[in-house]
C-alpha cells in the first residue's frame, strides 16, 4: 500500500532531513493503522534517537499527527485505519518567536 | 533701557514655552512609562467612543471604505485593547500593524532588553537601543507611527502571580513568546480569564499560527495535554530563524486580532496555519475541537488557578540558555589552558561538536580539528575517523591521548564527552571539554574572536 509520510517543524531532522517520504507498506494480515505504522517507522526509517519521536506506543508529546490535513484526533488517533494514498504528516510544534 | 525690557520679555516668553514643553514631555513620558510591577495602579478603563473624529476618518480612510470593516469596525477597533506577550520576532510586526490599524490600547510585555543579535528579526528596535527594555522600545517606535493609540509597556516576566491581573485588563491576547513554559501559562491564564489567545511561533524556516480558546474551540492544552520533553525543544538561539518568518506569522497574528476586534471572525479557531518558507507553502489544517477532558477548558477542569509552569514543563520560562554542569571539574579545562596546549604544541585531538555551518562562522586555531556534530556522535563513520587519529597519536608513543571537545557555549561539549567515552571505550585516552566553549575563548583568550 502506497502512502506518503511528511515531517515538519524539525521532525524531519530525525528522518534523514527529508520532509517527504513516499513509502510502500508491505502487505500484512492485520489492517494497517497508525499504531503499527509507528512500529514500522521505528524499525525501517528511524535511524537514531527514537525517543525524540516516540514515547511508548505513540508519538512523543509535542508532535501533532495529521491525516490528510486533519488532526488525527478527528479520525481515531492510533486506531485510524490507513487507506492507500493517505498523506500522514508529523509536525513538531514550534515554540520560538 | 528698552533693550533691557525687551530681553526680559523675551526671557519670560521662553520660560513659559519651556514650562509648556516640560509639561508635554511629562505627559508623554507618563503615557509610555514602563510598568515593572502589577501592583501599580490598574489601568483606567479604555475610553469608549461611538464615532470617529475627522482626523481618524482621514487616517483610516483606506480601511474604512472596506465594507467588511467600515466605520462600525473601526469604532470597535478603537474601543478594543490587545496585549502582546513577547516584544521579539513575532511581537514587533504584530505591534506595528495593530498600532497602525488604530487599536485603542496596546499592552506589550517583555522582561528582556534589546541585544544586537535580535535586530535581524525584531525590527522595531534600533541599534542605539541595545540594552533598552524591549517593551519600551516597541512602544516608542509604535508611538511615532500612531500617537493616537495608548501604549502600556510592561518590563517584567509574565508569571503565575501577575498573569491574571494583567491579562484580565485586555480584550485579546497575543502569544508572541519564545518558550514552552510561558505558552502553557498564557493558555491557562487566557482560559481562566475568558480571553481569546492568538498564538504564533517560528523557528528556522517555519512558522505556525492558531487561535485558541475562541468560540468554544480548543485551547493549547486540548492539543498538547503534556509538555514536550525538554531535550526536544529548540529555541531560536540554537536552531536559528530567518527574520522574515516570524515577521509573516506576527503580521498574521495582528491580522487575526484586528479581525476579531473589529467584528470579523477569525479564520483560525480550531485550525492551524503551517508556513514553510523553504517550500513556499501555506497549509491550513483542521484541528480537534475543545476536549471535554481538558484539564483547564474541559467540562470538569482540574486547573482552576495558575500553577508552577517551569516545574510543569521542566524548563525555564525564557529562551536563554543556562550553563549546564554535567562533568566533574577534572574533566574540564579552561579556554586559557587550551591556549597553553596550543602554544606548547602538545599533541592532542580537538573535536568540535558544532554543526558544519557553525564552523564556517569561526573556529579555534587548530588546523587538524575534527568536526563531529553532537547529533552525529553515534555515527560509526565519524567515530572511526576519530579512532584512526587516536591510533596515530598512540603509535607516536604518547600515553593517554588527550582529546579536547569544544562547542559554542560549553553545554553540548559536556554531553559529548560522555557520549564519546561510551562510544570509544578506550582507557588510553583522556577526554576533556573546554569550559564555556568558544564564548569563553572570545572572552578570556582572543577578544577578536567573534561571538554568535
Ligand atoms: Zn483545553
Image (cartoon, coloured by chain):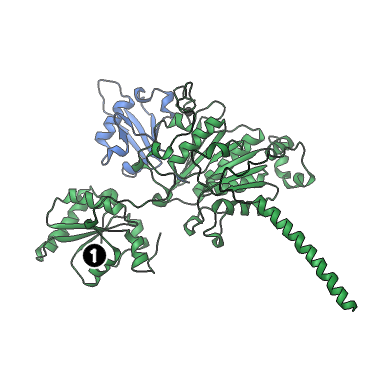
Chain colours: A blue, B green
**Quadrant housing residue A36:** top left
Whole-percent x, y for residue B112 in the image: 50, 52
Q: How many marks?
A: 1
Q: Mark 1 points at which residue?
A: B368
Apparent side of residue B39 relative to residue A34 in the rendered image (left or right): right
Whole-percent x, y for residue B292 in the image: 47, 22
Crowding at label 1, few (<14), some or many (≥20) Cα neighbours within 10 Å?
Answer: few
Residue A14 visible, this orientation: yes
Q: In front here: B380 or B5?
A: B5
Name the residue at the right extreme: B2
Q: In front here: B170 or B12?
A: B12
Whole-percent x, y for residue B336 in the image: 29, 67
In the displayed structure, would residue B131 be above or below residue B229? below
Q: Does the residue labelled 1 lie within 8 Å of ligand 1?
A: no
Name the secondary structure under disc 1: loop
The residue shown at (50%, 41%) is B200
Apparent side of residue B414 relative to residue B176 in the rendered image (left or right): left
The residue shown at (68%, 46%) is B149
In the displayed structure, would residue B193 be above or below residue B36? above
The residue shown at (69%, 36%) is B76
Apparent side of residue B383 relative to residue B240 in the rendered image (left or right): left
Apparent side of residue B108 relative to residue B374 in the rendered image (left or right): right
Q: In which quarter of the image is the N terminus of chain A?
A: top left
Whole-percent x, y for residue B191 in the image: 52, 30
Q: In front here: B47 or B418?
A: B47
In the displayed structure, would residue B347 be above or below residue A79? below
Residue A18 visible, this orientation: no
**Quadrant housing residue B339:** bottom left
Q: In front here: B275 or B412?
A: B412
Mark 1 chain = B
Amino acid at each position: 500500500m502506497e502512502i506518503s509520510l511528511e515531517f515538519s517543524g524539525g521532525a524531519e531532522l530525525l528522518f534523514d532531513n527529508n520532509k517527504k517520504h513516499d513509502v510502500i507498506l508491505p502487505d500484512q494480515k492485520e489492517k494497517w493503522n497508525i499504531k503499527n505504522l509507528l512500529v514500522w517507522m521505528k524499525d525501517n526509517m528511524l535511524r537514531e534517537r527514537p525517543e525524540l519521536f516516540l514515547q511508548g506506543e505513540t508519538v512523543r508529546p509535542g508532535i501533532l499527527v495529521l491525516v490528510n490535513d486533519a488532526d488525527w484526533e478527528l479520525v481515531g488517533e492510533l486506531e485510524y485505519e490507513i487507506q492507500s494514498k493517505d498523506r500522514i504528516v508529523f509536525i513538531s510544534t514550534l515554540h520560538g518567536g | 533701557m528698552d533693550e533691557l525690557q525687551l530681553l526680559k520679555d523675551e526671557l519670560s516668553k521662553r520660560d513659559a514655552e519651556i514650562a509648556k514643553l516640560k509639561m508635554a514631555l511629562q505627559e508623554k513620558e507618563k503615557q509610555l512609562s514602563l510598568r515593572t510591577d502589577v501592583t501599580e495602579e490598574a489601568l483606567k478603563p479604555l475610553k469608549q467612543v461611538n464615532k470617529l473624529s475627522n482626523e481618524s476618518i482621514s487616517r483610516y480612510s483606506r480601511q474604512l471604505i472596506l465594507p467588511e470593516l467600515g466605520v462600525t469596525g473601526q469604532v470597535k477597533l478603537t474601543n478594543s485593547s490587545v496585549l502582546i506577550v513577547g516584544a521579539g520576532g513575532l511581537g514587533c510586526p504584530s505591534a506595528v500593524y495593530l498600532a497602525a490599524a488604530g487599536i485603542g490600547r496596546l499592552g506589550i510585555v517583555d522582561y528582556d532588553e534589546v541585544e544586537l543579535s535580535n535586530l535581524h528579526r525584531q525590527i522595531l528596535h534600533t541599534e542605539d537601543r541595545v540594552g533598552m527594555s524591549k517593551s519600551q522600545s516597541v512602544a516608542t517606535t509604535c508611538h511615532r507611527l500612531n500617537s493616537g493609540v495608548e501604549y502600556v509597556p510592561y518590563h517584567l516576566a509574565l508569571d503565575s502571580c501577575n498573569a491574571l491581573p494583567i491579562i484580565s485588563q485586555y480584550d485579546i491576547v497575543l502569544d508572541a513568546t519564545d518558550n514552552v513554559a510561558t505558552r502553557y501559562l498564557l493558555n491557562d491564564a487566557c482560559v481562566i480569564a475568558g480571553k481569546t489567545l492568538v498564538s504564533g511561533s517560528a523557528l528556522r524556516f517555519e512558522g505556525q499560527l492558531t487561535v485558541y480558546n475562541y468560540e468554544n474551540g480548543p485551547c493549547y492544552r486540548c492539543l498538547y495535554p503534556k509538555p514536550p520533553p525538554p531535550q526536544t525543544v529548540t529555541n531560536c538561539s540554537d536552531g536559528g530563524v530567518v527574520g522574515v518568518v516570524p515577521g509573516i506569522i506576527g503580521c498574521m497574528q495582528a491580522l487575526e486580532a484586528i479581525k476579531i476586534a473589529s467584528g470579523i471572525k477569525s479564520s483560525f479557531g480550531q485550525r492551524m496555519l503551517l508556513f514553510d518558507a523553504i517550500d513556499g507553502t501555506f497549509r491550513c489544517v483542521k484541528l480537534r475541537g475543545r476536549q471535554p477532558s481538558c484539564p483547564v477548558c474541559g467540562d470538569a477542569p482540574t486547573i482552576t488557578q495558575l500553577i508552577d509552569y517551569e516545574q510543569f514543563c521542566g524548563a525555564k520560562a525564557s529562551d536563554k540558555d543556562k550553563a549546564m554542569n554535567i562533568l566533574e571539574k577534572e574533566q574540564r579545562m579552561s579556554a586559557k589552558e587550551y591556549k597553553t596546549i596550543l602554544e606548547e604544541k602538545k599533541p592532542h585531538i580537538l573535536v568540535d561538536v558544532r554543526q558544519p555551518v557553525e564552523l564556517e562562522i569561526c573556529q579555534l586555531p587548530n588546523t587538524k580539528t575534527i568536526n563531529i556534530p553532537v547529533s552525529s556522535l553515534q555515527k560509526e563513520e565519524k567515530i572511526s575517523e576519530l579512532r584512526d587519529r587516536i591510533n596515530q597519536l598512540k603509535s607516536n608513543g604518547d600515553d593517554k591521548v588527550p582529546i579536547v571537545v569544544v562547542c559554542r557555549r560549553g553545554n553540548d561539549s559536556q554531553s559529548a564527552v560522555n557520549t564519546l567515552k561510551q562510544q570509544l571505550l578506550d582507557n588510553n585516552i583522556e577526554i576533556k571539554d573546554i569550559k564555556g566553549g568558544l564564548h569563553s575563548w572570545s572572552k578570556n583568550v582572543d577578544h577578536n574572536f567573534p561571538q554568535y
